[in-house]
Image (cartoon, helix red, strand yellow):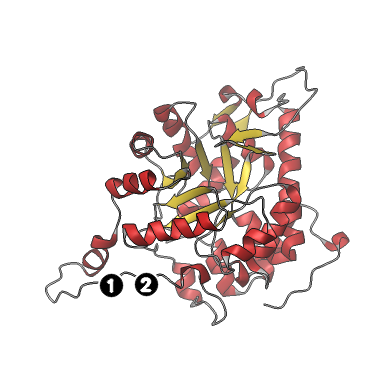
Amino acid sequence: MSFTAPDSDQLPRTLNDYYSRARAGMSPRNRAYFLAGAGDGQTASANETAFQQAEVTPRMLRDLRGGSTEVSLLGQKLVAPFLIAPFAYHRLLHDAGESATARAAEAQSIKMVLSAQSSEPLDRVRSSGPGSDWFQLHWLGSREATQALAQMALDAGFTRLILTIDAPVQGVRDREIEAQFQLPPDVSAVNLARFTPPAFTSREDAQSIIFDHIAETLPTWADIAWLIETLEAPLLLKGVLHPEDAAQAQRIGAAGVIVSNHGGRVLDRAPSTLSALPAIVAKVGPDYPVLMDGGIRRGVDILIALALGAKAVLIGRPIACGLAVAGDLGVSHVLRLLRDELEIAMLLSGCATVQDIERDMVHLKL
């Protein structure tokens, strides 16, 4: 994982160039882990296709003076309506791992959501990017263990929490299986080292190996409601695709939901996140924080998601590509390109502010 940063004049010029260079430069195992989806990859592909098939109808001759991409979200002001999505094991892409990503986020005043499966200690990442105070939780098999992980994050200075709920088991990832993906000895989820994996009961008469082994460790809505009540920080639920699940999250006091299919890495044939977004926003109302991820590759994609009701988006694979190509400099450049493209898309569609982005500007050909 040795790395030599290129000079700034050797950086890719476009986002697509980052994607192509990252794909060409990654090892087959890393390419399978970071860029492929579950199964046949249909959901991962559908996430991107949904944006590619969306049409934006510009509005003309509007007053565009005093434009800004700023938004307010959960009591925080963001310079642009996107965050770095949580994803694991940045050290597979760069020796400095999540610390490099956090430095890049800090340089662009963009917030990073640190994964529970970070390959760097969370206090080190916090010091590298103090402005990134969002943390992603996984359910660790019990209320007590999950609460302890949340408290560890809060004690380190994180103030906004996300619980991923859509991956009780890992999806069937053909590309990782074919590439024989495994973590090298020097990369691990270091912040989870103190937590003991849940023990499974052996049953000779088990009718279903997978169900019998994990069912007793999976959370229910009652568990999530309990966790929300115990935390002194907003908790969003990530991995919602059904409007009724979003409504249930709203009822139990979740601070918001993130429309996500885990980047197409869990259940292949799940709907694209963009196609699921409008019905979820309609169900919970325009004031409830609904975020989304999956398939966002260009700045105009951010505008499309906002037009369909998202308050902000999370961006994963473009960040992984920037990190793989040029470390923190690459991530910083990708963030800058995304924001520049968003501003250009807003200007060309007649929107001076995010609040000017309207639903009838976007037509989905789904």
Residue at the limit of the structure toward the left, as seen here: 205
Q: Please tell me which residue is depicted at 38% across the width and 45% down the height of the picture.
A: 228
Q: Amino acid at mark 2?
A: Thr
Q: Residues within 10 Å of mark 1 (few under 14, many from 20)?
A: few
- Residue 200 relative to residue 237: left or right: left
Q: Which residue is mark 2?
A: 196
Q: Please tell me which residue is depicted at 41% across the width and 44% down the height of the picture.
A: 240
Q: Amino acid at mark 1?
A: Ala
Q: Please tell me which residue is depicted at 19% across the width and 75% down the height of the picture.
A: 202
Rendering coords of residue 1 (x, y %): 67, 77
Residue 199 - label:
1
Rendering coords of residue 201 (x, y %): 21, 72
Q: Residues within 10 Å of mark 2 (few under 14, many from 20)?
A: few
Q: Quadrant of residue 209?
A: bottom left
Above or below residue 66? Residue 327 is below
All told, the count of numbered labels is 2
* Closer to viewer: mark 1 or mark 2: 2
| Cβ atoms under marks 1 and 2 closer than 8 Å | yes
Rendering coords of residue 49 (x, y %): 55, 45
Above or below residue 290? Residue 210 is below
- Measured in 3D between alpha carbons, the distance from the residue under mark 1 to the one under mark 2, in whole angstroms, is 8 Å
**Residue 105 visible in the displayed image:** yes
Q: Quadrant of residue 129?
A: bottom right
**Who is closer to the viewer here, 261 or 284?**
284
Q: Callout 1: helix, strand or loop?
A: loop
Q: Callout 2: helix, strand or loop?
A: loop
